[in-house]
Amino acid sequence: MTDALRIDSGQDLGRSRRALDLVLGSVAMLPILGAGADVWIAPAGLAFTVSLVTIWTGVLLAFFAGVRRGLTFSELGGARPLELLTMLWLFALGLGAVVFQSVSLSMIGLASVALLDARAAWLREAPDYFLWFRPAQMTVALLSLLAVLVRQHAA
């Protein structure tokens, strides 16, 4: 069996600049950050905010799962079992967050992204900047979701 070949740099993908990636990744967290503030500013809309934030998080997790799967298409020999499990794990958590309107599943999913993407960057299976960006990005989202969860249990 041949080891998977991976593209080692953004230059090889024709994407030498990461500024747009960082901006888009940061903007994607704004609805979650807004939800964390909204539940304390306008607590009457708690159920609506929980619905929106779990849907948004579920969509993000499905997106991250799709990106994971897409990366494996460029590998010689196709995806490895752990890569497929990671994709399915993120997708299942995203789906569960939406179906069950679960802030906890949302948090588990985003924590998984922080850990798995940082690990992937360490192993050179993902862009190098994921080593610091994903944990920082997901920490902001997790703190915001924690605020939602605390408010939800206080209500």
Image: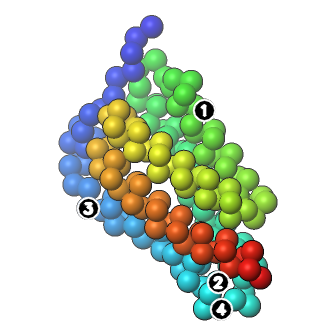
Q: Which residue is mark 2?
A: 39
Question: Upstream in the sequence, badge 1 or badge 4?
Answer: 4
> Hey, what amino acid is under mark 3?
Ala
Q: Which residue is mark 4?
A: 42
Q: Which residue is mark 1?
A: 85
Question: Upstream in the sequence, badge 1 or badge 2?
Answer: 2
Q: Nearer the viewer, mark 2 or mark 3?
A: 2
120 left or right of 147 in image: left
> Hey, what amino acid is under mark 4?
Ala
Could you tell me if the residues under marks 4 and 2 are in contact, i.e. CB atoms within 8 Å? yes
Circle 2 packing at 10 Å, graded few (<14), some (14-19), many (20+), is many
Q: Nearer the viewer, residue 107 or 12?
A: 107
Disc 3 is placed on an element classified as helix
136 left or right of 70 in image: left
Q: Residue at x 65, y 92 (%)?
A: 42
Q: Which circle marks residue 19 in the picture?
A: 3
Question: Upstream in the sequence, badge 1 or badge 3?
Answer: 3
Q: Residue at x 33, y 61 (%)?
A: 22
The x and y percentages for residue 7 are 30, 32
**Cα distance between the residues tagged 2 and 3:** 31 Å
Could you tell me if the residues under marks 1 and 2 are in contact, i.e. CB atoms within 8 Å? no
* Residue 26 higher or lower than 83, as above or below: below
Q: Nearer the viewer, mark 1 or mark 4?
A: 4
Could you tell me if the residues under marks 2 and 3 are in contact, i.e. CB atoms within 8 Å? no
**Cα distance between the residues tagged 1 and 2:** 34 Å
Could you tell me if the residues under marks 4 and 3 are in contact, i.e. CB atoms within 8 Å? no
**Cα distance between the residues tagged 4 and 2:** 6 Å
Circle 4 packing at 10 Å, graded few (<14), some (14-19), many (20+), is few
